[in-house]
Amino acid sequence: MEDPLAWELAKRQESISIAEFFEKNRQILGFDSQPRSLITSVKEAVDNALDACEEAGILPDILIFVEQSGRDTITLIVEDNGPGIVRRQIPCVFAKLLYGSRFHAVKQSRGQQGIGISAAVLYSQITSGRPVRIISKIGKDHPAHYFELIINTKTNEPEILKDEEIEWDRLHGTRVELEMEASYVRGRRQSVYEYLRETAIVNPHARITLVEPDGNEILFERASEEMPVAAREVLPHPHGIELGTLMKMLRYTERERLAPFLRYSFSKIGLHTAGEICKAAGIDPKTDPHTLGVDDAKRLIKAFKRVKIMAPSTDSLSPIGEELIYKGLRKEHTADYITTITRTPSVHSGHPFVVEAGIAYGGSLRKDGPAKILRFANRVPLLYQQGACAITHTIERIRWRQYGIDQPPGSLPTGPIVILVHIASTHTPFTSESKEAIADVPEIMSEIDLAIKELARRVSAYLSKEKTLNLRREKEVIIKRILPQLATKTAQILELPTPDINPVIAKIMGNVLVKREIHEDGEVHRVIMEVENNTERTQEFTLHEIHEHPVYNPSPAPKTTPIGSEYNHQWRITLKPGEKRAILYDLQAMPDELKKLPPPIVEGVGKELLTGAEAIDRGVGDGG
Amino acid sequence: MEDPLAWELAKRQESISIAEFFEKNRQILGFDSQPRSLITSVKEAVDNALDACEEAGILPDILIFVEQSGRDTITLIVEDNGPGIVRRQIPCVFAKLLYGSRFHAVKQSRGQQGIGISAAVLYSQITSGRPVRIISKIGKDHPAHYFELIINTKTNEPEILKDEEIEWDRLHGTRVELEMEASYVRGRRQSVYEYLRETAIVNPHARITLVEPDGNEILFERASEEMPVAAREVLPHPHGIELGTLMKMLRYTERERLAPFLRYSFSKIGLHTAGEICKAAGIDPKTDPHTLGVDDAKRLIKAFKRVKIMAPSTDSLSPIGEELIYKGLRKEHTADYITTITRTPSVHSGHPFVVEAGIAYGGSLRKDGPAKILRFANRVPLLYQQGACAITHTIERIRWRQYGIDQPPGSLPTGPIVILVHIASTHTPFTSESKEAIADVPEIMSEIDLAIKELARRVSAYLSKEKTLNLRREKEVIIKRILPQLATKTAQILELPTPDINPVIAKIMGNVLVKREIHEDGEVHRVIMEVENNTERTQEFTLHEIHEHPVYNPSPAPKTTPIGSEYNHQWRITLKPGEKRAILYDLQAMPDELKKLPPPIVEGVGKELLTGAEAIDRGVGDGG
């Protein structure tokens, strides 16, 4: 060691640009295989479009155009009707990693890292050698700007190859064109189609059009004209705030006294609470925050835990909602039982978040193999790295057998079960920049755990009820099989039309009867629904008609709420034993549409007590 | 849209420093929970120490000191005897993200990202508010430098709080001290202890000392005085090289002609091959590389695929080796059957890599639950994110039933099986900066697939052999149970010492007999091994004595190779039917050590034909 080796080694030390880093580690950004690389690119572009439109209060209209431009190269074009991007910022937005508008905002959004789209640009230039082409226009009276850009990976700065004004027919919006080594796959969950389909389900306000390489065009039509409740930017919540973060806030605040600093730097801290905290921390409220050191900061954090502080408001979040989750599950799977929940908000490291979940069980779901897991973060479906995700890990750790559901030790439960989890958060802690898996953050895992256990309880209640009711079922089955035959026979003999025998069954079974008759009449049809309570007790329930059609001259008038592309018309009904009621409305539909009309749905009456309608038990509202 | 919203949105656009990014997304670096944060910090520090020592050709001697410095704060000290770091570079090495010496080197090393240790520093300052303390010394006649540093997260530049010369008793080395929010856990695989234990197994040249919070000291003693074959830095291999990378190389080369450019920029391209490639690409070998465009580059890449190019050399890699993997598995698990393989090198995006694997089956391994997976990358154990790893994914996709091993659809195989996989590569494509899971890179997955399927074939061969031999076993069991009883009885009656019954059993069973007698004699003992072939055919086999002791005056002399802390003394023996041979040696050991002496091991004779020794079938060498 006379001539120190350290000198030799030192020569090799150098700093690495973030672009070089990701050029070499693009798999971290989600570009590890050809199919995934395309999906990731689509995802980044679409997420940006949706975020931009939401910020601008514009109903998104997004076109995705996938073209096979070579044996294994694909040209991807994503065009939106968003607010557009001002000229001077286009280069950095698309050709500089770690550049963005949402990184510092405490507010739910899809892009929170400032990496996404420029990552796709980086991948495209690595694999195709071609620049990214961008058109953006910010308003009617403004020119459209056309750019060709590459990222200089040595410096992580944009290199502008072209910068022109051009004609563009849109009022405002942005268009990105990328060529890349990639492949377009069909028919599995990990596909562009599936990603867009699931995105459409949880973003019913968006219209998304996909043009596949073979020219086939798929439209995911906007299912609602309402913008989702926009997430407001809020102050960080004191719970779980980190020492380092707090010290930074203390150093850079303009306030000169601790109490006001607390009030105006955090959400949910008012005049009173601020005082409480100072007292609990044993620091004079008048102290200048800039003079506080590590140990004071530590005392403040302890005080945050001791003093009672209100839970964070959900203003900064925009959950999907139990209705829509229920709808999403129902649309995809014909299950016997579906239940959903939206938890009350909670906090991790000062970031509010809400966990929502749904379980579908039985029906035509695959009985063998592990449960199907559907993961969403801030309305973005997560298709990859299921095994790395806190959602999966939490589900695996739950003891499913105690809810009557099979489970190989330490793995996912097995059987006909689909579990959906959505995490809405102002900062989603992903395990990597590819944003496909949520890290094992204890606060988040415990919320997922509580949500799913609540649903599992409902499933097991449902399952045990099923058991005890089997006898009753068998009886009903027999009656249902025999009576109709009798009816038909008799009808044939008497040369009369076969009567609807549901009412009879309902009587014999002592059920609530729902009888829907549709009198076809050209294009406008008269719908008559009869509900009758044959049970021994008063029944209070909601009757749902869920289909694509608005109702005309209804009596009584229903409460109507849009779900996805359909309407949910609801009638609240109370019937004493033996009581009857009729509900009427007109609807406009093609004859073949009439055939596809789903059966009426009754909420609040067990399916075993129901004839002529589907029963649901969503447990809506008993979350939290 | 008259006053474009884009202007409003534009105000919020800003660039984000990599340090800010990771300050907010520290879970990406592996700091998501208190126990994991500590493990990650230890890992980063130890990896650096091992890399530095290997580069300097020093046998590593590493001390890890974990102290509970607060209710949930821990002080971590890691000290090594490495080459040290020159003064001016200490700040950047520890307090600047994306700074390092190994990022651009095409060579196997643990740290390849230039993020690791500064990530731990970042986490420590976020959670404890304290600076990192460093001591480093580069040689006997040089002063030791003491630094206190923090990372300025706004700029990702080091801030130097202290910079002093101090006395330090070491000749050379580095000492890092970090305080952080963390917790020390015991008794599970995801623990500091377990990480170090596994590290010691695959790095037998390292001495590692762990001092636990309660003061308990654990020494993982160096098991070999030999440095592992040092990995040499090499040129990238043409296979799978990326367009972007090639274009960069073309742009920045000093060569003025294509042919020499190819020869001196890539490994395994000689004069002849270079010509071939130019011809295949239809480009004049004399062309100036700087004049070539995207399409020429694309043609060159096609040519790389068409022209025959030698596989990459392993100089740049340092695999663990079948012996050591076997040893590691054998040490940890008492299995009935262990088999290991080291594949020939392969390439992903120009980076050579080697896959090694081992399977242990049966014995005392847990019979229920999924297989235990042990993952290693460049001699670093991977403890987290198993579900995200290409190793796991590949194992899950293999159809294990066809090898006679149970498997729930789409999951890990179940039963008494341990699967170890090591990937040695000049560039490991991790799914995130936490370096816990390998991305699903097709080339790597197919190598893992081939390695494991080969091992699975051997296991299933072993299992079917087991079955067909059950009858023979039963017979042997009975004989083995009864004869000794007879012998003892008779001996008692005749008042003689109980004879060794193995020779008789061997005769009756027609087995190969190995009989080891140790004549104790003070401290030096005479070992006599008799081998006898009672089978009907000539037997060729290797007799192994694997224990901690060297052998003295052996006859015949064995071939001795060190495995970990032990020696493997091997005798190659051929015996005609009925033939006998004696092997003698002296060994020095305490009487109680003698008792612990493992039985002799025979390689090349099925266990069913063996009496008095363990059988092994490692299939060593039939990899590739």
Image (cartoon, coloured by chain):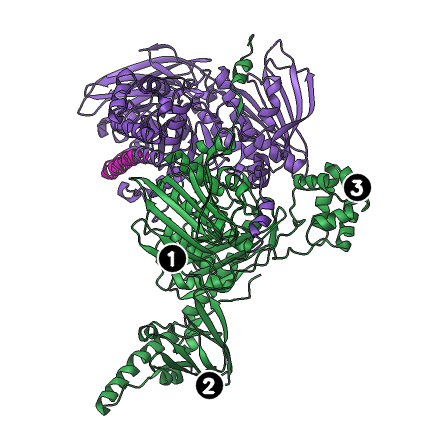
Chain colours: A green, B purple
Mark 2 closeness class: few <14, some 14–19, many ≥20 residues within 10 Å = few
Residue occupying image coordinates x 48% and y 23%: B102
Image marks 3 and 1: residues in contact by CB distance under 8 Å? no
| Secondary structure of the residue carrying numbered label 2 | strand
- Residue B10 in picture, x, y percent from top left: 58, 46
* Chain letter behind tag 1: A
| Secondary structure of the residue carrying numbered label 3 | loop
The residue that disc 1 covers is A415
Q: Amino acid at mark 1?
A: Gly
Q: Is residue B460 magenta?
A: yes
- Where are the magenta residues, as a range? B452-479
Q: Amino acid at mark 2?
A: Arg
The vertical placement of A272 against B504, above or below, is: below
| Secondary structure of the residue carrying numbered label 1 | loop
Question: From this viewpoint, is residue A449 visible?
Answer: no
The residue that disc 3 covers is A288
* Chain letter behind tag 2: A
Give the distance between the C-alpha atoms of the residues marked 3 and 1, in whole angstroms: 60 Å
Mark 1 closeness class: few <14, some 14–19, many ≥20 residues within 10 Å = some
Give the distance between the C-alpha atoms of the residues marked 2 and 3, in whole angstroms: 71 Å
Question: From this viewpoint, is residue A351 visible?
Answer: yes
User: For the residues carrying marks 1 and 2, which lies nearer the camera in this image?
Assistant: 2
- Residue A580 in picture, x, y percent from top left: 46, 86
The residue that disc 2 covers is A581
Q: Is residue A113 left or right of residue B249?
A: right
Q: Amino acid at mark 3?
A: Asp
Disc on the earlier residue, 3 or 1:
3
Disc on the earlier residue, 2 or 3:
3
